[in-house]
Image (tube, coloured by chain):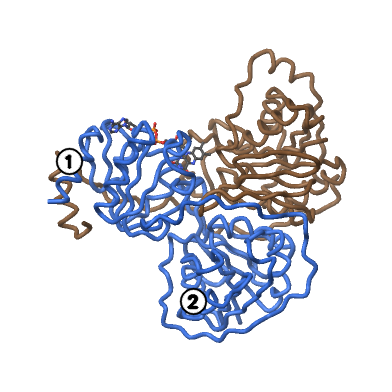
Chain colours: A blue, B brown
Amino acid sequence: MMSNILIIAEHNGKELNSSTAKCVTCAKKIHPDSIDVVVLAADSHQIATEAAALEGVSKVIRVDHPVNEYPLAATLAPQIIELANKYTHILGPSTTFGRDLMPRVAALLGVGQLSDIMGVENAYRFKRPIYAGNVIVTVEAPSDRILIATIRSASFAASEQTGNAIIEKYSINVDLPKHTSFLDLRSDSGSSRPDLQTATKVVSGGRALGSKDNFDLIYELADVIGGAVGASRAAVDSGYVGNDLQVGQTGKIIAPDLYIALGISGAIQHLTGMKDSGTIVAINKDEDAPIFEIADFGLVEDLFTAIPDLIAALEK
Amino acid sequence: MKILIPLKRVIDYNVRVRINPDGSGVVRDGVKMSINPFDEIALEEALRIKERGEATEIIVITIGTQENQQQLRTGLAMGADRAILIETSEELEPLTIARALKVLIDREDPQLVIMGKQAIDSDNNQTGQMLAGLWNRPQATFVSELTLSEGTATAVREVDAGLEVIKVKLPAVITSDLRLNEPRYVKLPEIMKAKKKPLDTIPFSELGMTPETQFSIVSIETPPKRPKGIMVENVSELAKALQDRGLI
Ligand SMILES: Cc1cc2nc3c(=O)[nH]c(=O)nc-3n(C[C@H](O)[C@H](O)[C@H](O)COP(=O)(O)OP(=O)(O)OC[C@H]3O[C@@H](n4cnc5c(N)ncnc54)[C@H](O)[C@@H]3O)c2cc1C
């Protein structure tokens, strides 16, 4: 059976997001006849060049249009529908971008969606987590319909940058809705620290930090080991850090080589976001904290003494 | 202005979900069921909008068996005005749920549908976006702040890069994130009062559509357990362990 896959590129208007390279890896496991990537942007030149370099990509389709300056699902979805009929699968990342967009695409095509693919059995059989990752289901989709799916980034490595795909321009001819407009993006992504979603090391703080000022301890340790900073929902709700740092069922799902959880109890909703990490370290003053059940290294200690001591030990 | 709030009955978020010994599904017997936490937040937002005088009626809807009345009654006790149960014993996929909700939209003509961004059982995160697509109306997903004025809604959305602000024309579908609000607790008198509020049951077959099942579950399993870790005595032991693994 032929399969031809279309991947919706995620980007910030300038650069390709690493989630796209992970979708490509997932797509390769389907052993398709072709993998195309579509970049919908105001000016996609640079992003398309990055996408074309991903190993496994056959063709990059550039859809340049001023309305594509911001990633609004309501305007992107009808453009994707225009391209859809050539494909057996359309994949997007299971990031807030893909989660927002892909179900709208599916509904417009009159088909269902598979969310958060974490493993590929064959072109129509996949594994995905449910119940905050406490249960894994293997799901089969019908092969006589286009399959719309989102890909769990933490489950796939990024495809290498050794490819050389052709790049084509495409102009879309559909009426786009005007009922939705972008106003603002409040982001501190200007920071020089590694990005939480791609970092190999992450230091996360919980409610135990007690204040925004105290949370500086987490940043200090992260800087010493060259890691990104994450947080529990309680830390975000308490205003210690922004929502973009939340790890968990409703935040980011990550799998760094090293995850250090400080003053985090280990609620299942948090664990689902980090339990696939290579090595997990937990420091908590409660020896019964559930986080210790999944930690490779646990230390029962007050974090206000443990973190400064750890920083001192590592700086030696 | 009418607001429609779809509610899903799910296993309570505090329950440790387990798979049946025969692998046929998860254990439900004697397990506490609740309104999906995100849907409760959606309802709370609607109640606040009504309390500000910006809405006139709030309708809670659920699709499922008669047992779902329990969640609808809780919704009424929180302050919804009436409830609709679309009765079916089948497990439905998000696209079918969205299509059923669209039928209700055509009947009720709401200006806003507010729903949870995901259900904590299937974790699909699809229904709101699908409904907005079928309805051909705007969607504002993962919302942590919502302001209405003159036929538009301004929504602050929790996205991976931070907070995105968008403006949509009504009618629209909003999906709630956790930080949108903290739902109220229901008090006993409200539970009593809720018993008198209207709750209509509509058989699914009366919607004039056939449910469609596209995906089939082949198998269900517990994720592999991590190997048991070790407890270290102090910070220097920890630092050494991490250095030995080449992690630092
Ligand atoms: C639908 C839903 C979705 C959710 N999604 C998420 C999510 O995506 N991510 C997430 O994180 N949570 C999520 N939650 C919330 C989750 O259930 C927990 O409430 C949250 O993770 C708790 O955060 P915490 O561990 O920082 O706080 P707590 O549970 O309060 O734990 C604090 C820990 O710090 C320890 N401690 C206190 N003082 C010290 C000290 N001085 N030194 C050392 N240790 C100390 C305590 O022993 C305790 O273990 C969700 C909940 C729901 C209902």
Q: Is residue B236 above or below residue A12?
A: above
Residue A62 in percent (x, y) is at: 62, 78
- Label 1, ligand 1: CB separation under 8 Å: no
Q: Is residue B224 left or right of residue A314?
A: right
Determine the secondary structure under disc 2.
helix
Choose between A226 and A197: the one closer to the eye: A226
Would you name the residue on which mark 1 appears?
A: A309
Is the residue marked by circle 1 packed among few (<14), some (14-19), or many (20+) residues within 10 Å? Answer: some
For marks 1 and 2 on the same chain, the one whose residue lies earlier in the sequence: 2
- Whether the residues at callouts 1 and 2 have beta carbons within 8 Å, the answer is no
Asked whether residue A293 appears in the rendered view, the answer is no
Choose between B197 and A199: the one closer to the eye: A199
In the rendered structure, which amino acid carries the disc numbered 1? Asp
Would you name the residue on which mark 2 appears?
A: A50
Choose between A188 and A267: the one closer to the eye: A188
Residues at discs 1 and 2 both on one chain: yes
